[in-house]
């Protein structure tokens, strides 16, 4: 059975989606979350998340990075995107298993949810072409070292506290877990994470952890997806 968690800042949208999905066989909505706290509370009860691009207190890009590190078995589809292949790929690189466009129907949405649950993906030809271009670009890089050399010295720009936060990110800790270990507020952790990503010139926590790992060992170590 597909156990869906809805994440969206609008209760009205959540209720409308729940009504539509409740009529689908083998689909069960475990709950609706409008904040990151609500989402993380309900997350263990789901196997697919239908996530808006923003919640009340965070963005889908930030949530995708954390979910991929803490619950890699859960599939996340981002809801309500424009048909912009480059923007869509940003979400896929952050960990999304699929996407729902603004003008797609409930039937199309359910098809994509079922595909994600079955370890498949439904993408438009334009997104598929953009993904091929992206893979070609990555393949053209000499080695991951080219990616790392540009950031190696940036690790020295981190403050001692930011270094502590980055180490805990690398260990797979959530923002709340980092806050508990360092005895600081969760909002302060979010600020530190934002600054770390900016200083290392990376898109998400996954990439930040990769930079740290690769500079701690003789050979690059890939972070598990």
Image: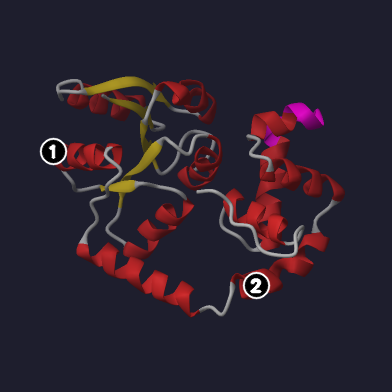
x then y, percent, for residue 42: 45, 21
In the image, what residue occupies the spot 44% across and 27% down?
A: 34
Q: Is residue 184 magenta?
A: yes
Near mark 1 (Cα within 10 A), the count class, few <14, some 14-19 or many ≥20, is: few
Is residue 67 found left or right of 191 in the rendered image?
A: left
Select label 2 or label 1 by which is in front.
2
71 lies above or below 148: above
181 lies above or below 211: above
Residue 171 sits in quarter: top right
Say which label, 2 or 1, has the lower sequence index.
1
x then y, percent, for residue 209: 65, 52
* Most common SS among magenta residues: helix
> Which residue is nearer to you in this view: 55 or 142?
142
Contact between marks 2 and 1 (CB within 8 A): the answer is: no
In the image, what residue occupies the spot 27% across and 58% down?
A: 83
Is residue 222 found left or right of 28 in the rendered image?
A: right
* Disc 1 target residue: 107
Q: Work out how far the residue at label 2 is from the one at label 1, CA to CA, in angstroms.
A: 44 Å
> Which residue is nearer to you in this view: 192 or 70?
70
> Which residue is nearer to you in this view: 80 or 146?
146
140 lies above or below 51: below
Determine which of the numbered discs, if any, sits on residue 6 in the image.
none
Question: Which element type, helix, strand or loop, lies under badge 2?
Answer: helix
Q: Is residue 63 magenta?
A: no
Magenta stretch, residue numbers: 180-187
Figure quadrant of the N terminus: top left
* Disc 2 target residue: 145
x then y, percent, for residue 216: 77, 57
In the image, what residue occupies the spot 19% across and 36% down?
A: 110
Question: Which element type, helix, strand or loop, lies under badge 1?
Answer: helix
The residue most toward the front is 218
């Amino acid at each position: 059975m597909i156990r869906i968690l809805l994440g969206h800042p609008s209760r009205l949208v959540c209720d409308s989606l729940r009504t539509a999905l409740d009529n689908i066989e083998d689909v069960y909505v475990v709950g609706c979350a409008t904040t990151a706290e609500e989402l993380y509370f309900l997350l263990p009860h789901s196997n697919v998340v239908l996530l808006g691009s923003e919640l009340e207190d965070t963005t889908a890009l930030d949530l995708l990075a954390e979910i991929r590190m803490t619950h890699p078995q859960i599939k996340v589809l981002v809801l309500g995107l424009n048909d912009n292949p480059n923007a869509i790929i940003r979400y896929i690189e952050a960990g999304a298993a699929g996407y729902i466009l603004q003008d797609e129907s409930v039937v199309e949405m359910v098809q994509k949810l079922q595909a994600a649950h079955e370890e498949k993906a439904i993408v438009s030809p334009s997104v598929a072409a953009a993904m091929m271009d992206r893979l070609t670009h990555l393949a053209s890089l000499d080695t991951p070292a080219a990616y790392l050399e540009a950031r190696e010295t940036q690790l020295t720009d981190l403050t001692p506290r930011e270094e502590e936060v980055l180490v805990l990110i690398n260990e797979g800790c959530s923002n709340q877990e980092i806050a508990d270990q360092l005895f600081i507020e969760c909002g302060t952790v979010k600020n530190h994470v934002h600054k770390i990503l900016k200083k290392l010139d990376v898109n998400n926590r996954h990439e930040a952890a990769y930079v740290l790992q690769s500079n701690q060992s003789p050979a690059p170590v890939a972070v598990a997806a």
